[in-house]
Amino acid sequence: MNKPFRHKMYLVNSYMKRYLLILFLTLTASAVSAQQHLLSGHITGPKNELIPFTSVYIRNSTYGTTANEDGNYQFRLAPGSYKVVYRMVGYREKAYDVTIGDHDERLDIQLEEEIFTLKDSTAYNEKTDPGMDIMRKVIAARKQHMQEFKSYKATVYIKGVQRLISAPKGLMGETVSRQLELDSVGRGILYQSESLSEFNFEQPSKFKEITIASKTVGASPPFSYNKASDLQLNIYNDVFAINGLSSHGFVSPVASNALSHYNYKLVGTTVTNGRTIHKIQLLPNHKHSPTFKGNIYIVDGDWRIYSADLMLTKKNDNLNLIDTLNISQQYIPIRDSVWLPSAIQYSYNGNVLGFEFGGYYLGIYNNYRIDQTFPDKYFNGEVLRVDTAANIKTSNYWAATRPLPLTKSEARDYVKKDSAEAFHKTDVWKEVNQHKKNNINYFSYLIFGYDASSRDERDSLYIFPFLQTFYYNTVEGFGINAKVTYTHKVDDFHSWKITPALRYGFSNKLFSANMLGEYLNDPFHNSKFWVNFGSDVLDLNNVGTRSLYFNTLSTLLYENNYVKYYRSQYGGFGYQRELANGVMWSGSLSYSGRRQLYNTSFSKIRDVKNKEFTSNNPLAPAGTPADDQSFLFPTHQALSLNTSVAFTFDQQYITRPTGKFNLPSKYPTLTLNYRKGINKVFGSDVDYDFVSADISQSNIRIGLSGYSSFKLTGGDFINNHKLYFMDYYHYLGNQGTTFDPLYIGSFHFLPFYTYSTYGAFFEAHYQHNFAGSILNKIPFMRKLKLEELIGANFLTTRGNPNYREFYVGLQRLIFRVDYGISYTGNNKYIQGIRIFYGIR
């Protein structure tokens, strides 16, 4: 039996087992459901106002739910007697005895406002306020409460909704309203999501989430929290981040150093269910510090969190995308000594160009099982596994499973969008939509290229941007570089793509044609084969210099022909595969015939004073004329072997039905590289051995002060008997005002070819992004939401020791401006400004 067949049989058996398990669980759930009845009702306040998102749970259990936006709640209970508890911040907790018989029960609840009273009327003083003493006790007990349990399992339901509340009439035409499915005044639900997961946690920070069911309709928002792991808000941690909305963290009100950031005011005290609860107002020491406003509720004696109602604002906290964010969290006793969240909610609103929107993400935690024993190696880096049937659950399944009822508008939205989705799967819609989707947008094509796909989206075509198609350089003159990628999806696990390219230089009349083919055969191990062959005009610096677009501009406008080219006729193949979690191996073998090229064209749009084109020989002395044909290397053949192994420590990943997706690690990645020039095989002229190692990590969060990134690389040619300039070790340098800061291993001012070496070298790069923590303290700069950066780059080689760069920068979204200075040895080399605006 061959290996592909065995693999397919394994997948079939695996799927059969999963579907049988799902069928068994469904039948079991149906049997249990038949023995349960619905407890439902409506929750209002003392003035009959609806109270949304009230927590409802069964006392002395870990089973509960939350009311929806309209104050309606429901959950299923087996026949028996229960003590049902209703809790909402600002209202007095109520508990009712409920008996479930052989039919559904309805219990409408009217909550009373919680009255917090002070024992005396002493005026507030931050040094004497009893709130300070209470919070000192809470902070002292913080670690104890974090370590009350070793592990747990829980069932987590996540609900997300985003609404458009109002829109400017001038921008809300019929087409826009129809596209967003809004009403006549520009209101409607833009997005809904639901998920049901099993969440497994072990101290101090190991977790694995298994998504059982997931549903999403509408346009995806720019930020989302639709997984249980997204809503793991632990107020007992010192710092926690609001991913997607802020680039810096926020100090918890009970952090170990919270007294340096907050003052606390005791608003009042009440007694609930025999417990004394203190309401503490949070008073940040500084208006624009990375802290929360709001209230936190503390259990007297235990000095633990009862609930929290926190707030962040765009004005004070530099939030992105939204104006306000409210965070609400309710804790319930799982055991007398263990309290865990029953519900967590993020609610937000914002305004963009007059479009006012709002929404929420709500997490409901049920069926806690404390101090679970997990199998060995259960926490193996897989932090999320999505069940194969998670995205195909029926509306009947969700109606029986979701712990809170849909509002009328949410139900209507589901019906409308589910119907639309069903229609979008018809051949009629696919035919219409294909023509619409494949219409070309010429402005987009200019910068980003053009995409087209077949009706079933198994076949797609990408045409590279116009800015990369037409070019000019002094070697080829004006030229055309026509390049497309065709992709075919065989099935969920296999796909291939080919990228043919045609290139022609009108000055040197050199025609090139080449092709790259890739076959992705195992998405669960990031495995793929590739082969390439043909002819091309290549950069002598094999790690890249300037794009065709930027080199065209600098050459024609400023007579800076930075990039140096050579001719290559080549063929090669390679393979990569993840050998184990966090261990990625790749290898390739290539053969090429290479020859030197010379400048043949000297066109320019304008004359630049005291400026001349330079030779295509990067090692030619300064002042060498542009038409120079000095010798750099002879025409030769090269057979080269490349291999590398990357070790990502504590690699975390997501497993979906279509493959494995690695996540950024909180630990560095170590990469070992080996390259060999093989001599006297197929006439190969090269003979060298090169080894290098690098260690790197990005986005290392440094408390409240932003995040750092670094890369260290060292290597040597242990054999350099025979090699040519393109075989040297090259660096990602930069010449010109624009630069690309997206890769931490790049330089700001280093020439592209001057430091290239066939000997030992060491380079180091470090950058820190303060994420606005400095400029946020300056009133007139705060509104700009700029992120401040500092960084340094270092390089030393045998011939050019101790090259250094230091820089500072400002960044906003894709825009960045840096000012820096560089040194060669003890001498200042270059200083100036470098800019980036999203185009590379």
Image: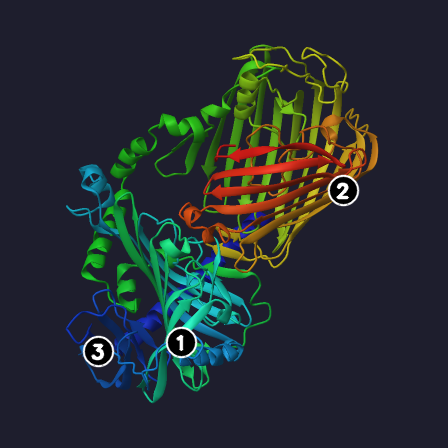
Q: Secondary structure at mark 2?
A: strand
Label 1, on which residue?
Answer: 125
Q: Amino acid at mark 1?
A: Asn
Q: Secondary structure at mark 1?
A: loop
Tell me the number on the disc at residue 742. none
Above or below, 151 relative to 406 = below
Reading the chain from its start, which is encountered first: label 1 or label 2?
A: 1
Query: Label 3, on which residue?
Result: 111
Query: Does residue 279 lie above or below 175 as drawn?
Result: below
Q: How many marks?
A: 3
State the SS at label 3: loop
Q: Residue at x 43, y 68 (%)?
A: 198
12 left or right, relative to 589: left
Amino acid on which the number 2 mark rests in the picture: Gly
Find residue 178 and report its horizontal and vertical position in percent.
Answer: 20, 42
Residue 478 location, quadrant:
top right
| Vertical arrangement, residue 362 with respect to residue 659, above or below | below
Q: Are marks 3 and 2 in contact (CB under 8 Å)?
A: no
Asked if residue 283 is positioned above or below residue 306 in the image, the reply reads: above
Q: Residue 709: x percent and y percent?
A: 60, 49
Q: Nearer the viewer, residue 315 or 616?
A: 315
Callout in the foreground (3, 2): 3
Q: Of residues 83 and 195, which is closer to you in this image?
A: 83
- Res. 626 image quadrant: top right
> Gap between marks 3 and 2, in whole Å?
70 Å
What residue does disc 2 label?
A: 715
Which residue is rendered at x = 24% and y = 55% of the image?
414
Amino acid residing under circle 3? Leu
102 left or right, relative to 734: left
